[in-house]
Image (spheres, helix red, strand yellow):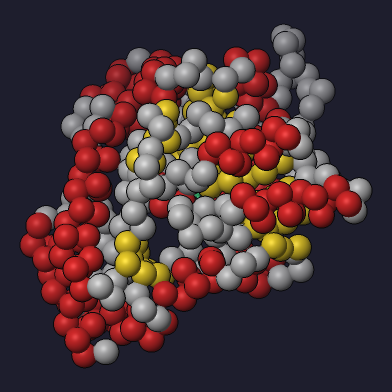
């Protein structure tokens, strides 16, 4: 926590705004909107997953539709497609950013069109905080008139040519889950440049109550609004977001300085104009066995590390889905490892991790 969170929670208690609305919710939304700029409107919600569910619905996705989704991601990017009765079509990554490959994206769109199933939306993800190829993805989406849902759950604090991630899609989402760069313990947000879309998102997120003195409904709603207590945590966290990004970037830099020179360990570098919040520092090892021996050596010292996300097209639950692959995300999954990356790591924690990795490499 940054410091001011408890004060803002206390304000909620003092004013008795213990509800999924209130001053903290409004002020948290304003803080996010002013951080992102670009005249966005923000709806604070109970999770990033809920935000994606609403974003897809607002993008017009419904039953039997097909939605393109980056395969190399966390399952929460894809699951909400199925909540709407739609089907995900998974598209592999390119090696420059590890995110959706523009060429395969266009192949997938043309394939859908040729089957009379033009995709209803594209879910693209700034994975681990690295921006995807925004210009190319947006150009393809625009050419085919398909809305982009920008999954920026891991990329608050990242930017692409100076413009913050979370402002590039037709609708974007953020997450404040406990593991993200800033957190409200659980929470998310929907970001849009259209104030009417925000209004509609809040309407759907609060059980779709029509304007009436009684309870009247002409649409199916959800209970997805953020608690005013948790929004107090969010206000405090926004004040330290830039510090968190600096710390995570410093972690990455430290690992890079000590491991890059080994030549056997690869890092994802920032292409010109890309700035990653370095939510997690990830390394690529020469192969699966070496990756596993590093992971086990760390585990033996009680240090947790994790393989990179397992691509959605390789997940049992999605084994009947259409996919467009090139082997990139499967290779990343086999060789990649997420290192300890928290904002509270001390230099000696990083040194310990680095030492164990180097020793494991020599013994491998
Ligand atoms: C965390 C995450 C989500 C979901 O956010 P929650 O707030 O945990 O529901 C979606 N997409 C990606 C890429 C994530 O990392």
Residue 139 image-quadrant placement: top right
Q: Can residue 64 be seen in this view?
A: no
Q: How many marks?
A: 0
Q: Position of residue 214 (x, y in %)?
A: 74, 14
**Residue lying at 63% horizontally and 26% vertically, measured from the top left:** 201
Query: Looking at the image, can residue 8 be seen?
Result: yes
| Residue at 29% in and 64% down | 339
In this view, the residue farthest toward the right is 116
In this picture, is 321 found above or below 79?
below
Towards the viewer: 331 or 127: 331
The residue at the point 50 percent across, 72 percent down is 331
Picture layout, residue 138 above or below residue 99 = above
Q: Which residue is at a point 19% across and 68% down the rendered structure image?
A: 261
Question: Looking at the image, is 115 positioned above or below residue 37?
Answer: below
Residue in front for this viewpoint, 45 or 318: 318
Q: Quadrant of the N terminus?
A: top left
Residue 6 in the image: x percent, y percent? Answer: 24, 30
Is 65 placed left or right of 207 in the picture? Answer: right
Which image quadrant: the C terminus? bottom left
């Amino acid at each position: 926590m940054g410091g001011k969170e408890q004060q803002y929670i206390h304000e909620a208690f003092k004013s008795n705004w213990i509800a999924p609305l209130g001053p903290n919710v409004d002020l948290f939304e304003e803080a996010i909107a002013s951080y992102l700029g670009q005249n966005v409107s923000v709806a604070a919600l109970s999770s990033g997953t809920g935000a994606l569910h609403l974003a897809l619905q607002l993008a017009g996705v419904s039953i039997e539709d097909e939605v393109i989704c980056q395969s190399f991601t966390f399952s929460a990017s894809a699951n909400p497609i199925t909540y709407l009765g739609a089907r995900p079509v998974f598209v592999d990554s390119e090696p420059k950013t590890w995110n959706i490959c523009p060429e395969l994206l266009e192949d997938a769109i043309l394939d859908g069109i040729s089957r009379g199933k033009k995709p209803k939306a594209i879910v693209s993800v700034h994975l681990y905080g690295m921006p995807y190829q925004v210009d190319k993805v947006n150009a393809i989406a625009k050419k085919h008139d398909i809305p982009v849902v920008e999954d920026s759950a891991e990329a608050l604090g990242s930017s692409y040519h100076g413009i913050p991630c979370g402002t590039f899609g037709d609708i974007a989402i953020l997450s404040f889950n406990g593991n993200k760069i800033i957190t409200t313990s659980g929470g998310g947000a929907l970001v849009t440049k259209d104030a009417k879309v925000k209004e509609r998102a809040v309407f759907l997120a609060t059980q779709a109550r029509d304007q009436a003195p009684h309870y009247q409904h002409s649409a199916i709603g959800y209970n997805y609004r953020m608690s005013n207590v948790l929004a107090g945590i969010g206000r405090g966290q926004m004040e330290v977001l830039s510090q968190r990004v600096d710390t995570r970037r410093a972690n990455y830099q430290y690992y890079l300085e000590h491991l890059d020179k080994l030549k056997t360990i690869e890092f994802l570098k920032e292409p010109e104009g890309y700035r990653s919040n370095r939510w997690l520092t990830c390394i690529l090892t020469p192969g699966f066995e070496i990756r596993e021996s590093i992971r086990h050596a760390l585990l033996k010292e009680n240090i947790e590390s994790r393989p990179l996300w397992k691509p959605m097209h390789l997940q049992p639950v999605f084994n009947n889905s259409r996919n467009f692959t090139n082997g990139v995300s499967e290779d990343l999954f086999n060789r990649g490892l997420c290192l300890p990356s928290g904002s509270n790591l001390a230099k000696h924690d990083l040194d310990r991790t680095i030492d164990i990795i180097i020793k494991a490499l020599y013994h491998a």
